[in-house]
Amino acid sequence: MKQLFLSAVLGLGFAGIAAADPVDGTWKTAPGDTGGYLHVAIAPCGSNICGTIKAAYDKSGVLDSGYEHLGKKMIWDMGSDGDGYYSGGKIWAPDSDKTYKSKMALNGSKLEVKGCVAGGLICRGQDWTRIN
């Protein structure tokens, strides 16, 4: 009986690992206007996907531990459409302090992240690179 219980628990644990979304992980944003960039951790939040600012770096690659937006959600309510495509979420742009409708497309270790206005007709985006 103990072996059956242990097998069931281990099976559930491995099922959780196997169910991880391919976009989960830490991503390096493209450099902003000042040359600095962020590390954003993307992970499940409820039934959707969110991204939280975990670290900030200046244009020289020096960690900015005093960055005022550390821990802030940058992406939320992003739903998976399958095949590496995501939509329905929001993205906050630190450079403009504005929130946009968002969509993403995963291609290997690159993540194309877009913020859109005008019903999704006008979009501004970046390519992010997977850190881990």
Image (tube, rainbow, N blue to C red):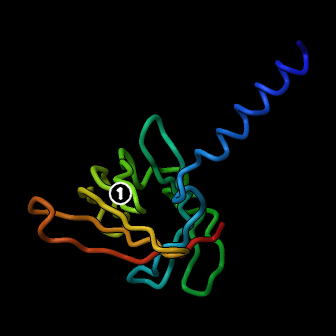
- Crowding around mark 1 (Cα neighbors within 10 Å: few <14, some 14 to 19, many 20+) is many
Which residue: 49% across, 75% down?
A: 110
Q: Nearer the viewer, residue 62 or 115?
A: 115
7 sits left or right of 69 in the view: right
Q: Nearer the viewer, residue 47 or 31?
A: 47
Q: Nearer the viewer, residue 104 or 95?
A: 104
Query: Looking at the figure, which quarter contains the C terminus?
Result: bottom right
Query: Looking at the figure, which quarter contains the N terminus?
Result: top right
- Pinpoint residue 83: horizontal percent, then vertical percent: 41, 61
Type of amino acid under label 1: Tyr
Which residue: 54% across, 58% down?
A: 22
- Pinpoint residue 19: horizontal percent, then vertical percent: 58, 44
42 sits left or right of 99 in the view: right
- Pinpoint residue 113: horizontal percent, then vertical percent: 37, 68
Does residue 132 sit above or below 60 in this rendering? above
Which residue: 44% across, 68% down?
A: 106
- Pinpoint residue 16: horizontal percent, then vertical percent: 64, 39
Q: Picture quarter containing residue 12?
A: top right
**Which residue is denoted by mark 1 in the rendering?**
86
Q: Picture quarter containing residue 57?
A: bottom right
Q: How many marks?
A: 1
Q: Residue furthest top?
A: 1
Q: Residue furthest left?
A: 118
Does residue 17 sit above or below 114 in this rendering? above
Which residue: 82% across, 18% down?
A: 5
29 sits left or right of 55 in the view: left
> Dot 1 lies on which element?
strand
